[in-house]
Amino acid sequence: MSENAEAGGKGARQCPICGKPAADRFTPFCSARCRQIDLHRWLGEVYVVPGDEGPANEDVDETGADGEDGKGDGKGGDKG
């Protein structure tokens, strides 16, 4: 019975990249290589967290350039 319990426990996790058993040192991956592959996929935007996109970049840029953000006139001068 303890053998079956362990099979469903933490030791039975598989590497999400290659499917090999996960190593404690690299959890949830089996090796540094698979960990690096996963990081590369996140940084290369292969993986994306779904959600609201928020305001468009052009809206943010216009607010800063117009001075409507209350931080000045956008010309870099100090009004002291």
Image (cartoon, rainbow, N blue to C red):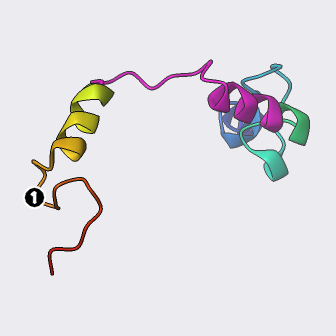
Q: Residue at 60% of width from left, 23% of height from top?
A: 45
Q: Position of residue 67 (x, y in %)?
A: 15, 50
Q: Tell me: 18 left or right of 60.
A: right
Q: Tell me: 48 left or right of 80.
A: right
Q: Position of residue 27 (x, y in %)?
A: 74, 44
Q: Quadrant of residue 37?
A: top right
- Total numbered badges shown on the rendered structure: 1
Along the line of sight, the residue nearer the viewer: 11 or 37: 37
50 to 65, vertically: above or below: above
76 to 58, vertically: above or below: below
Specify the quadrant that holds the C terminus.
bottom left
Q: Residue at 67% of width from left, 25% of height from top?
A: 44
Residue, disc 1 = 70
Q: Within 10 angstroms of label 1, few (less than 14), some, or many (20 or more) residues?
A: few
Q: Tell me: 38 left or right of 42.
A: right
Q: Position of residue 32 (x, y in %)?
A: 88, 42
Magenta stretch encompasses residue 27: no
Specify the quadrant that holds the N terminus.
top right
Q: Position of residue 19 (x, y in %)?
A: 80, 20
Which range of residues does the magenta coloring cover? 35-54
Q: Residue at 28% of width from left, 37% of height from top?
A: 61
Considering every residue shown, the one lying at the far bottom of the view is 80
> Looking at the image, can residue 68 be seen?
yes
Magenta stretch encompasses residue 48: yes
Along the line of sight, the residue nearer the viewer: 34 or 59: 59
Amino acid type at circle 1 is Gly
Along the line of sight, the residue nearer the viewer: 40 or 79: 79
> Looking at the image, can residue 13 be seen?
no
Q: Residue at 74% of width from left, 30% of height from top?
A: 40
